[in-house]
Amino acid sequence: MPLSDRTFARAPAFVLRQCFRYLPFGVGASEGRDRDRYVRAARSVGCNAVSAALGFAVVLLSVSFTLPYLGQERFGIWMTISSLALMLSVLDLGVANGLVNLVADAEASADRDSLHIIVTRGIALLAVIGVGAAGILIGLVMLLDLQRLLKLGSVAVTREAVLATLTFIALFCLNIPLGGVRKVFFGMQRAWVPHTAAAIGYLCSLPLLYLCARMRAPLPYLVLSTYGIQVASALMLLVRLHRERIFRVHRGIWAGTGWRDYSVLMKTGGLFFVVQLGFICGSACDPLIVANILGAKEVARLAVAQRLFQVITVAMAMLSGPLWGLYADARSRGEKAFIGKTLRMSMCVTTGSALLMSSLILVVSPWLLKIWTGNQLDVPFELRCAAAVFVVVDAMASAFAIFLNGVNELRPQLFAVLVFCAISIPLKVYLLTKFGTVDWAIWSTIIASVAVDYAVYLGICRKRIFAHASLKPQS
């Protein structure tokens, strides 16, 4: 009997279920759900692997294509602008992350109407936030003296930097509600959908980057060819939610418990907002700190060193990211044994994999840099060592943060990130000024991260956190 289109589309999930069939899962009613959760996670990891490989190809080629014609200063400006996507991600006020657990709760209760309402109101709220953020950011760019802030050498380069920054801001503010769309799929344990959309975007970016390099395109075109294409690909996800009747805007959507839903979203999102803001202040603002103290040229060295090991960060996010929705679903059902087993497995796999991969990349880094940059940029061994150690520490922290997000334990993260910022920012300024080498920006982050994680998570908040993760099987 011939297979139908629907059967063919479901074949990968069927194969995964057979692979997981004989592995030890929970007992009783939770056994089927445990297996299904791991199947969903495996599908997400597979799609994310493709997306991550394409994304890493874009990162590698963006350096080899553009560094020769941009020069070190303009390339450093582009890397600084690229880092703004992570730095400014807090401007969604944490609402996008807050949607994950709320969507997971609605999915666990099988309440389709509640799911439709929370998704539509959440995306609408993010759209309003995006408009407000656009006004604030454009005003700041007009007020700031970028030539002095980034220590740029000419008026022409400054003008190009301003135009590229404004282009980025327009795309970023459009991406604020689209970021919420991506998180909705994470909450529904369908993370493979946004990963597929991202892969399509990266595929489109590759030829566009090549054309930009051939035509020696200015910085705004490079921003459009990379970040702009990713924003455009996310629009497909919004269309899909609309076709599935999960996102629908109509007059009745604002009636009933609208203000209560917004209040819940803002309260949950507010905690995520402070956690994200602290992380950005403590680590993601390194390019701006380095540019201000050592100059924009040093940002280029920092960016290349970090991107050399970025494949590890992407791979570890690929492994642990899909677990957020799984943790949230298990928390809603009170299945602590699943949470405990998954946390232990996640920490072991991510830490071991990151350690192995970083060691291998560090060994072959001279050869990789020669091929990648053509020896046009010197990246000191000390800087490469710092980047290698950082990705291992970051892998452990990210896997544990996904667990905390999934079980809705945000207050310990809030406390930890405040202490982290209080240590890392002054430490970076002091060490960069004292030693004058860019690797101390990374070492400062490592020192602060390890100290805070052990003091807060494994010390002060240990009992509260691990109450969610029983390692004993359920009866």
Image (cartoon, rainbow, N blue to C red):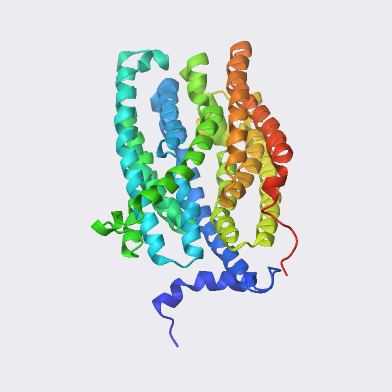
**Residue 135 percent coordinates (x, y):** 29, 30
Q: Is residue 86 above or below residue 144?
A: below
Residue 376 location, x and y as percent? 50, 24
Which residue occupies the extreme left position in the image? 251
Q: Position of residue 256 (x, y in %)?
A: 33, 57
Whether residue 207 appears in this view of the structure is no
Figure check: 293 above or below 174: above
Report whether 118 appears left or right of 142. Answer: right
Q: Quadrant of residue 257?
A: bottom left
Give 130 or 387, whichever is nearer the viewer. Answer: 130
* 205, above or below 250, in the image: above
Q: Nearer the viewer, residue 405 or 386?
A: 405
Q: Is residue 204 left or right of residue 53?
A: left
Quarter of the rendering occupied by the C terminus: bottom right
Report the residue at 51% width, 35% height from top.
Answer: 274
Residue in front for this viewpoint, 414 or 343: 414
Residue 164, quarter of picture: top left
Where's the N terminus, which quadrant?
A: bottom left
User: Residue 288 at what x, y percent from top left?
Assistant: 48, 22
